[in-house]
Amino acid sequence: MNNLSSVAGFLPDVRSTLSDENNAFFRNLSGINLPEKILFVIDTVRETNCTPFKLSTGAKYMPLFMMKRVVENFVCIKSTIQRKHEYAIMTLNGDSANWICDFTNNTKNIVDHLDAIDEDFQEEERNAYDLGQLFEKIQSKLPMPPKKHSTLIPTFITRVILMYSRSNSIPKFDTTKLDTANYSYILEVGKNAAKLHDNMAKLLAHPLQRPSQKDVCYTIYSPPSIQETHTNV
């Protein structure tokens, strides 16, 4: 999420790889307010020359601290909107990905697990990081969506929010296979705390009800000023 420089620091909001048939099935569900199962994947690696976030007050915080705080805010706000949403947590360190909290709608439980996450200090920096093992582990743990020909309407959808904070280790994955239906958002924030909070707010929207990222617009529209015509009487 934070990058962090060119690529690192994005916040992909991703969905498990689906076949073209299942993608069409999900498009037919567009607009339905199904409860979500949201998995947060939080990068815990602290690079040697890591640049902290700097707030307007002058205070400085490391990426992991900021990520934990925005996830906490996200969960509290999202749960206020819909209490049936559930959340799980995975951590991403230098060598592996670990599942640390199963899906739950207990916000206090989520916050407690967030507080227990520690930084992973990386002694040897890598130029690239293969996310393949992460997605394999995610796919083995996440509830799978129903097949296209199923007559049952799903009772929930699953979503993954990956927060990757390394600047020097480029994440490697095939985006064409990861998001075949164009549902994902990829958001870069650098070390800008305000942008980090803004982008997390963008992810609050239900994935079946929001536009694709290329069509979204967050600018408040103001119509051109209408010139008044004065008539002297």
Image (cartoon, helix red, strand yellow):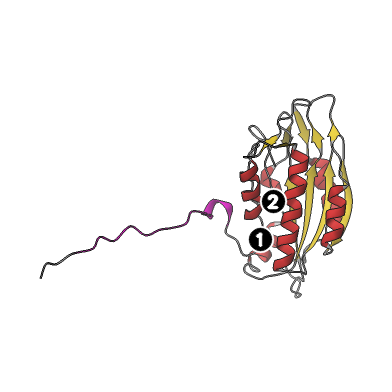
Q: Do the residues labelled 2 and 1 touch (CB within 8 Å)?
A: yes
Is residue 143 in view? no
Q: What residue is at 71 percent from the left and 61 percent from the top?
A: 77
Q: Residue flagged by tag 2: what amino acid is it? A: Asp
> Can you name the residue that lies furthest to the front here?
57
- Residue displayed at 71% across by 48% down: 178
Quadrant, the C terminus: bottom left
Report which residue position mark 2 lands on. 13
Kindly identify which residue carries mark 1.
207
- Residue 184 bears which disc, if any? none
Q: What stretch is highlighted in magenta?
A: 212-229
Observer-nearest of 58 and 210: 58
**215 within the magenta span:** yes
Image coords of residue 119 (percent x, y): 84, 37
Could you tell me what secondary structure mostly forms the magenta stretch?
loop
Residue at 63% across / 64% down in the picture?
A: 27
> Residue 153's x, y, as percent?
74, 73
